Amino acid sequence: MHVYSDRAFERHVNRLAGVEAPERFPAAVAGAEEAERAGAPVEWRSCQPAPEEILKAVHAPGYLDRVDRLSVEGGGYLDLDTGLNEHSWEAATLASGAAIGAVDSSLSGTAAFSIARPPGHHAGRNYGMGFCLLNHAAVAAEHARSRGIERIAILDWDVHHGNGTQDIFYADGEVLYLSAHQSPFYPGTGDVHEVGQKEGRGFTVNVPLRARSGEDIYAAAFAGVFVPVLREFRPELLIISAGYDAHTADLIGGMQLEATSFGRFAARLAAVAREIEAVPLALLLEGGYNLRALTESVAATIQGVEEEPSSEWEYLGDVRSVEASRKVLAPFWESLR
């Protein structure tokens, strides 16, 4: 696996949110190092800032100018929890560049992980929020399209719904967005009835889950919704918004996953990618605010990508939230009927 990182990610400081701290970067890097020591084939890669034309394919030019200007001026804020310092524009553009690097690696046949901050999935075309300045998953998808990839899926397992990613692709029939997230919870989006619009109807797939859900409930979401839809859509590329704030020890989440849960998610999705003849996974770091849990979860994810799933998940039709999603999405996906 290729791991993309840069020390610049440690220099971004968001003074409005103490949990999204510079220490998250070395904690996540330590996870990759731990996986490497355990035998995972990790190869470290540098990254370059995302090209302007790709950033403008995702974000409004005026919004990009505002974020850049605030950083040049020494800092400021975009939202009640989203602040910048003088290093934030560099960090954010490099984080999007790391996501591009991860996609290029996947398209060349090697799975990749972008270990970067600030996170990205709450950033929309013309707004930043939820600690996010630029939407790295969306940048990764647009870069893939610039390279001729026509069918892309973004699967988001962060505890929070990725409202920015959903908004950007809501009317897009080439990018499938799938999210399992705690609900009700910040940012208040991600209802099962949010399925996309125009050409994108059916290409937004939300499975909102109650607080304190554990791996059994997530496994039901994967087996009952995500895996069937991915098999039917057959994306050429699967991007993972890999947030770890659904870990039971996380400071702001309310779920009950363990580090090993993320390893099993990664193993299952890597197996699905092979089955549908997609390129290897491209994983992008999102949330995760307990430093030890972040280290362990990143390590488990990297190891999971290299392993075969330990067992097949079977959906028995007995999880209310999963059934609700299946019912709403059945008109768009034969595999859910």
Image (cartoon, helix red, strand yellow):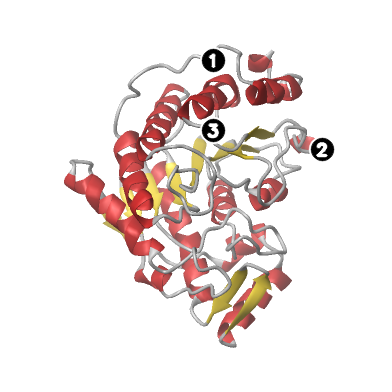
Rendering coords of residue 47 (x, y %):
39, 63
Q: Check disc 2 and report its element: helix, strand or loop.
A: helix
Q: Nearer the viewer, mark 1 or mark 3?
A: 3
Location of the N terminus by quadrant is top left
Q: Nearer the viewer, mark 1 or mark 2?
A: 1
Amino acid type at image mark 2? Lys
Looking at the rendering, which quadrant does residue 297 occupy?
top left
Rendering coords of residue 86 (x, y %):
52, 82
Given residues 28 and 51, the one toward you in this image is 28
Earlier in the chain: of badge 1 and badge 2, it is 2
Contact between marks 2 and 3 (CB within 8 A): the answer is: no
Look at the picture and state if 123 lies above or below 161.
Answer: below
Look at the picture and state if 263 lies above or below 51.
Answer: above
Rendering coords of residue 254 (x, y %):
54, 44
Q: Nearer the viewer, mark 2 or mark 3?
A: 3
Looking at the rendering, which quadrant does residue 272 occupy?
top left
In three-dimensional space, the C-alpha distance between marks 2 and 3, rounded to whole angstroms, equals 33 Å
Label disc, if present, on residue 213 of the rendered structure: 3
The residue that label 2 is drawn on is: 198
Location of the C terminus by quadrant is top right
Earlier in the chain: of badge 2 and badge 3, it is 2
Given residues 42 and 257, the one toward you in this image is 257
Tell me which residue sits at (50%, 53%) in the image.
Answer: 287
In three-dimensional space, the C-alpha distance between marks 1 and 3, rounded to whole angstroms, equals 16 Å
Neighbour tally class for label 1: few under 14, some 14-19, many 20 plus, Cα within 10 Å: some
Rendering coords of residue 72 (x, y %):
57, 85
The residue that label 1 is drawn on is: 315
Amino acid type at image mark 1? Tyr
